[in-house]
Structures are given as structure tokens and as C-alpha cells.
């Protein structure tokens, strides 16, 4: 499988960078989400801003100079691309051929900057004497009957529903202004003398006419005629994008909100913090229903917290949520008002002889996703991605080792708190690929049916991973278990990162697959990379 970067978007911080050129913390992308049809891509940052990218309506190739753009819509040259050209600059036909093997053009899915708006502001909680960051934790697109696009987003405490639509901007012309009218501002001396010696009012003229005549420098007054009066009219109408906050859901959580998800009924959504999951109605802002409560009577007895929650893609009554112990619970909202008991519990039984101090830490499930058909769940913990069949609770269908090479360095990762990093996982639209991030700006893409294992880097050349070793035989026996129900005889080879040059502070946490195309959107710092496999290569996508 051959991968390429077809576009890169970079947020311009407006000169607020540090002395060494690094992006500020407010520019770092904190959430990514495609719309249901893939027409829009929303990217939120730690500064509370949301940038919307729109899919181009017609077919474009790499010759159109769309490789790199700024998230703020500025196409001025900032960073050179693969052929040394700058952002937004056109390329020649020969350069376009050089970017793709055998002169093939890239996939016909490109995006452009649409708009940007400020979603959340920094606040202060006076009851708890703590500051609430404006960082957007999660974004969800909401389908409605209207033509406007609705976006549900949240920070640590406040959930907002935004409506984005085209508004008419009317330009009015043909005013009653003289084209050769020169207005000279009065000096201070003239103003004082004029105020001391007021001019008498002329008979038959209004005060406004006299004032206008004085401002225009005096002269003989003329009464306006019907021919000289012009009626203002609308010269042209332009459509501009406008974002309006329709709902503001606050005071629903005592702890920080980390997950939101919209139900398939189109009327309700959930929000989850460390100990509670609340059910909201879109029309009610000041009231929510607590459906999951994991808070014990004595906080000293607390053993696990909620890490992620989402609805089933096809059934509005099924809810799944994960915990810090590596457990995934599936519950039915019709069973009771408070879902204390779970319908199904997915957990890996770990032998006691292999138990260590880091066992529960690395088992923490940081993200869960339903597969497109809704029959399976993929869950990301610190070292791997597990694929669960909803009909089998005893063990996962398959385990994909993302960064099991870090096992000998768990002590060092614990000392610098990197062992608590949270990574997301995602699955392609056809269910054949799973992607998840790691350190040194790298990610892994696994083939659920072919058993492939690709190590990529979020850069203009994703296949050339800096510091990666030659492909070696996979050491994990679980990786060669089942792929699509068929056993894999030959364990595939995979590239590994060099632990000596591992950069734990360059991490890829957020990524999303396009819902209809083989396109993977990856957030790296304040940049977004669009990765795709080369058309014509020997892949299921080709």
C-alpha cells in the first residue's frame, strides 16, 4: 500500500509564535470531525476557534496548487511543499507528475477554507475558584430539517449548538450625495468662534438644511427638485457565511466534559464527564437527565472513571461507554431510567502473574468507535487497538499493536506523564482499515482483512518515516489471529521506531476517516494533513 499527502492546512497564529517558531498552545488542533456526507471538515483548536473546510465541488488534481493552504483562508506563501513551492502556488504539469508514481493524479477529494468563528471563550468558575479553558474537546455535526449546517461542540463545562448558514449581504447604492462634494473639517478656532456667533435662521428653511449648508462650506441655498432626488437602491446581493449560537447548554456537569454524541433520533444527545453521563434534549437548555452515575458514596472508594461514550449508529436505544480499567459497557436505555446495570460488558481477563504497576494504566481505554455496520467496536488503549464483536464478550476479535515497542520504557513514560496520553482511533468507511496515532508524529494503519501494518508519518512524504527501522517480523502473536474471520498464516512484517530518537512530545492524537472516500485527516500540532493511498495501487481502495 502506497500513501501520499495530497493537502496540508496550516493555521496562521497572526505572529503570536514563540522565538523559535513553534506554534502557540492556542493554535494546536484539539478536535476533528467530518460531516455525515464528507462535504465539510471541522477543526477546533485549544483557543476555542472552529475552522470549517469545504469540499471542492469539481474535480481537481495536484496541478491546481491545492497541496498546502492556511486554516485561516490566507493563500499567501508560508511553507514550501514537496517540490519547493509555497502554499497556494500553482504547479506545472511536470511537477504534478513527479508527485505521484507513474504520473497518476491524486484522489478527486480536495478541501478549501470556508469560514472560522470563535466558539468558546475563557471563563472563570467563581464557586470552585478555577479557570475554565476555551479549548474545544469534541465536535459533532447535527442534521436538521433546515438548510443550515448545525455543529454541536463542547469545552470542559459548556456545550454549544451553532448554526452555520448563508446570509444575504445587500449593497445599497444611488445615495443623494454630490460627487464633487468636498467637506473640509473645521479647526478648533473656527469651531469656537462659530459657537459664539450663531447665525440667524433663514425664513422658510429647516434647521437641518441650514446645518447641512454650514457643513458644506456655505454658499447659496437651493431647494431640491424632483429631478435631483435619487432613490437608494440595491446594487448587488452577496452571500456570506454566518455562524449563530442557537443553544447554550451549561451547568450540567460537575467534572470536565470529555465526550458528546448525537442520537440517531435527531432529538437528543449525551454528554459525559469522568463520573456521569447526561441525556439532553436539543430544545431544553437548562435541564438534563442523568442516565449513568459511577460516583460512589465515598470518593475514597472510587476505582474507575468514564473515558468515552457514544450512541450506536443504527439503534437509538443502545449506548456504549468505556472506563479507565479497560472495560467497555453496552447498555439499553429502555431498561431503566438510570442505567446502572449493563447489558454487555467487554473486558480482557488478564492473568495475575503478569500483573504489574502499569497494567491498569496501559489498559485505560481512551477512545471507542462503532464500526460502520454497527456490529463491532474498536477501542484504543495506550499500547494497542482492540476490535470487539458485539456478540462475543469473552475476548476481542483482534488486537492491533500500535506501540507495544514502548513496553520497556514505561517507567520513563510514567515519570514524564506521557503514559497518560490519550489517543483516538478510527475506521475507514468500508471497514477495511483502522488507524491510530503514536509518538514522533507517526501513526499506524492496519488492514482488518489483509493483515497489513503500515507505519506513516504526518508529513508531505508519509511513507518516509524518520528514524524507522527496516521491516521486521511482528513479535505479537495476537496480531496474527483473525482477519475478517480467516486465519493469517504468515505474520506480516512491520517497521518500528527507534526508541533512542523517540519524541514523546510530538504526538498524533486526533484523526478522522472520510465517510465516503479513502482519505484520512490527521492533526499534527497546528497543521492538518490529508493522507490517501495512491490510485491504482494494489489496495482494496484502488
Image (spheres, grey):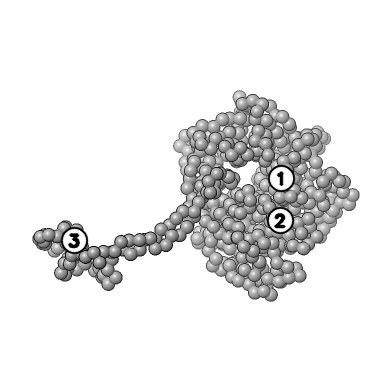
Separation (CA) of disc 2 from disc 1:
14 Å
Q: Nearer the viewer, residue 107 or 501?
A: 107
Count neighbours of disc 2 (C-alpha within 10 A) and say few if under 14, some if 14 to 19, many if 20 or more: many
At a point 66% along the width and 26% down the height, the residue shown is: 335
Q: Closer to us: mark 2 or mark 3?
A: 3
Q: Nearer the viewer, residue 140 or 430?
A: 430
Q: Secondary structure at mark 2?
A: loop
Label for residue 137?
none
At a point 62% along the width and 30% down the height, the residue shown is: 292
Label 1 vs 3, first from the N-terminus: 3
Q: Horizontally, is 428 left or right of 281 in the view?
A: right
Q: Are marks 2 and 1 in contact (CB under 8 Å)?
A: no
Q: Quadrant of the N terminus?
A: bottom right
Q: Position of residue 518 (x, y in %)?
A: 71, 55
Q: Which residue is mark 2?
A: 518
Q: Are marks 1 and 3 in contact (CB under 8 Å)?
A: no
Label 2 vs 3, first from the N-terminus: 3
Q: Closer to us: mark 1 or mark 3?
A: 3
Q: Horizontally, is 338 left or right of 474 in the view?
A: left
Based on the displayed image, in which of its 4 quarters is residue 212 positioned?
bottom left
For the question of whether residue 439 can be seen, the reply is: no
Label for residue 372?
1
Amino acid at each position: 500500500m502506497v500513501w501520499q499527502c495530497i493537502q496540508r492546512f496550516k493555521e496562521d497564529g497572526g505572529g503570536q509564535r514563540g522565538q523559535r517558531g513553534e506554534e502557540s498552545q492556542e493554535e494546536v488542533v484539539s478536535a476533528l470531525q467530518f460531516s455525515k456526507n464528507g462535504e465539510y471538515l471541522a477543526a477546533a483548536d485549544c483557543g476555542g476557534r472552529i475552522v470549517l473546510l469545504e469540499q471542492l465541488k469539481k474535480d481537481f488534481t495536484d496541478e491546481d496548487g491545492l497541496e498546502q493552504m492556511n486554516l485561516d483562508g490566507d493563500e499567501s506563501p508560508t511553507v514550501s511543499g514537496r517540490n519547493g513551492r509555497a502554499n497556494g502556488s500553482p504547479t506545472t504539469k511536470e511537477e504534478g507528475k513527479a508527485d505521484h508514481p507513474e504520473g497518476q493524479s491524486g484522489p478527486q477529494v480536495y478541501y478549501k477554507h470556508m469560514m472560522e468563528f470563535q466558539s468558546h471563550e475563557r471563563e472563570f468558575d467563581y464557586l470552585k475558584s478555577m479557570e475554565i479553558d476555551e479549548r474545544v474537546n469534541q465536535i459533532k455535526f447535527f442534521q436538521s430539517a433546515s438548510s443550515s449546517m448545525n455543529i454541536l461542540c463542547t469545552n470542559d463545562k459548556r456545550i454549544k449548538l451553532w448554526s452555520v448558514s448563508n446570509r444575504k449581504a445587500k449593497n445599497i447604492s444611488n445615495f443623494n450625495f454630490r460627487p464633487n462634494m468636498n467637506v473640509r473639517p473645521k479647526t478648533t478656532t473656527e469651531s469656537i468662534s462659530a459657537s459664539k456667533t450663531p447665525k440667524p435662521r433663514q425664513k422658510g428653511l429647516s434647521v437641518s438644511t441650514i446645518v447641512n449648508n454650514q457643513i458644506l462650506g456655505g454658499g447659496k441655498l437651493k431647494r431640491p427638485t424632483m429631478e435631483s432626488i435619487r432613490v437608494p437602491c440595491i446594487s448587488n446581493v452577496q452571500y456570506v457565511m454566518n455562524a449563530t449560537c442557537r443553544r447554550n447548554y451549561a451547568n450540567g456537569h460537575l467534572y470536565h466534559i470529555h465526550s458528546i454524541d448525537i442520537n440517531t433520533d435527531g432529538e437528543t444527545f449525551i454528554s459525559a464527564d469522568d463520573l456521569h453521563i447526561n441525556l439532553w434534549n436539543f430544545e431544553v437548555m437548562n435541564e438534563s437527565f442523568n442516565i449513568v452515575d459511577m460516583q460512589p458514596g465515598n470518593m475514597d472508594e472510587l476505582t474507575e472513571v468514564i473515558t468515552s461514550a457514544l450512541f450506536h449508529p443504527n439503534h437509538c436505544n443502545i449506548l456504549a461507554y468505556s472506563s479507565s480499567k479497560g472495560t467497555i459497557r453496552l447498555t439499553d436505555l429502555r431498561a431503566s431510567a438510570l442505567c446502572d446495570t449493563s447489558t454487555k460488558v467487554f473486558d480482557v481477563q488478564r492473568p495475575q502473574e503478569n500483573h504489574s504497576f502499569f497494567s491498569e494504566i496501559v489498559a485505560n481505554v481512551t477512545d471507542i468507535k462503532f464500526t460502520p455496520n454497527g456490529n463491532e467496536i474498536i477501542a484504543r488503549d495506550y499500547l494497542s487497538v482492540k476490535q470487539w464483536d458485539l456478540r462475543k464478550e469473552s475476548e476481542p476479535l483482534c488486537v492491533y499493536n500500535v506501540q507495544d515497542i514502548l513496553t520497556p520504557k514505561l517507567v520513563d513514560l510514567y515519570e514524564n506523564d506521557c503514559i497518560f496520553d490519550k489517543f483516538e482511533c478510527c475506521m475507514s468507511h468500508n471497514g477495511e482499515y483502522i488507524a491510530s496515532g503514536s509518538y514522533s508524529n507517526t501513526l499506524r494503519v492496519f488492514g482488518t482483512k489483509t493483515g497489513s501494518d503500515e507505519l506513516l508519518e504526518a508529513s508531505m512524504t508519509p511513507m518516509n518515516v524518520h528514524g524507522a527501522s527496516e521491516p521486521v517480523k511482528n513479535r505479537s502473536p495476537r496480531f496474527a489471529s483473525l482477519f475478517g474471520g480467516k486465519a493469517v498464516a504468515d505474520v506480516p512484517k512491520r517497521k518500528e521506531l527507534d526508541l533512542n530518537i523517540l519524541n514523546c512530545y510530538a504526538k498524533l492524537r486526533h484523526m478522522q476517516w472520510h465517510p465516503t472516500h479513502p482519505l484520512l485527516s490527521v492533526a499534527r500540532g497546528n497543521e492538518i494533513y490529508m493522507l490517501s493511498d495512491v490510485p491504482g495501487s494494489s489496495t482494496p481502495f484502488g
